[in-house]
Amino acid sequence: MIELQSLSDLDIIDYLEIFNSTVQVSNLLGISQSSCSRRYRALSDSLAIGFERFDNLYSASSNLDVLFLLRQASQKIRIRQNKFRYSESWHSTGNEIPNQWQNISIKSMDQSLYMNLISNRLIDICCTGIMEYMHVCNADSFLSSSKPILICNSLLAYPIMEWNYALVAHQDHPLSSKSNLAIEDLKKYPSLGLQFGSSPAFMAQITKHGLGSSPYGLSKYDLHRWEAFSKDGYSLSYAPYHQLPSLKNKFNLVPLNYDLNLKELISIVGLSDVVSSQAFFDSYGEFCKNLKNSSLYTDSSINWYI
């Protein structure tokens, strides 16, 4: 018989793999750091999974099938209690979620990280952009996105909204008042680019326009280092059109008269057995209602699918 203590200790191991810090995990779970370390080691020893820190990352090294089965069972219990572990990528932050959902704040700019966490059942669902995975989806699905989209063989995405990215700069930037901008104009100024392997499809589109010359240098999204990178009056960055009023007020950023032709399709993504469950549908409607009523998404440039 599985004891409740074992499930809470499994949460410690899960959170350590997600956040990679005993300090952060102990704070999140409301336990001491010494208790966090003692309990994950005790569970690791009892399961013989060799859970330790390797190359600055926490992970198991043996009996991985046992650990996966335990995570699968723990996930089923969470879902039936409507306690979904929810996260959101840098594309979609600050969403209001149902009260019972657990907000796992990661804010990574590496899209593959979220898919790996979902596949390993460390988080249950994620609100994220899926244009990054267009090459592995049925192209027809993106033309009629009112239905769930299958990503690979096990991940299912429920489209929520679509938006366009704008190229932004400070209102006093030399290019801010010019029209008919060309790639050669953009190349004259620093512009943000993500590190290799992070959102490669996004970066492929950016580099087509001669952009992406300045490495972002971080793994986590930071408004003041991403969109606000261009507040210096010289650099260029990117933002969804619905964020422009806020960026104008905060940093005096404006869109340049240049079409990036870059879209994002925001979706809820999860394993097919998770997002096909009745528990998911029971609370997904509330989540969508919160989004449509949110002041974050009042801009007419958003195309809704819900």
Image: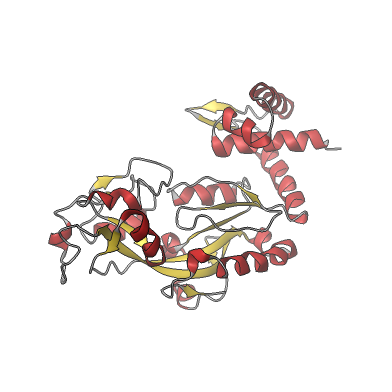
Q: Nearer the viewer, residue 39 or 90?
A: 90
Q: Quadrant of residue 33?
A: top right
For the image, the number of numbered tags is 0
- Nearest the camera: 236 or 13? 236
Q: Residue at x 19, y 51 (%)?
A: 234
| In this picture, residue 169 sits left or right of residue 146 | left
Residue drawn 42% across and 69% down? Answer: 163
**What residue is drawn where x is 56% and y is 47%?**
117
**Could you say where residue 282 lies in the image, as x and y percent from the top left?**
73, 66
Q: Residue at x 67, y 28 (%)?
A: 40
| Residue 266 visible here | no
Image coordinates for residue 37, horizontal then vertical, percent: 65, 24
Q: Decide if residue 34 is on the left or right side of residue 55.
A: right
Determine the residue located farthest toward the right in the rendered image: 1
Q: Quadrant of the C terminus?
A: bottom right
Residue 67 in sight: yes
Q: Position of residue 105 (x, y in %)?
A: 55, 46
Q: Is residue 288 above or below residue 216?
A: below
Query: Which corner quadrant of the image does residue 169 belong to?
Result: bottom left
Work out whether residue 206 or residue 148 is closer to the camera in this orientation and state it: 206
Tell which residue pokes out farthest to the bottom in this image.
144
Of 192 and 49, nearer the camera is 192
Q: Which of the image's four quarters has the N terminus?
A: top right
In the displayed structure, would residue 73 be above or below residue 208? above
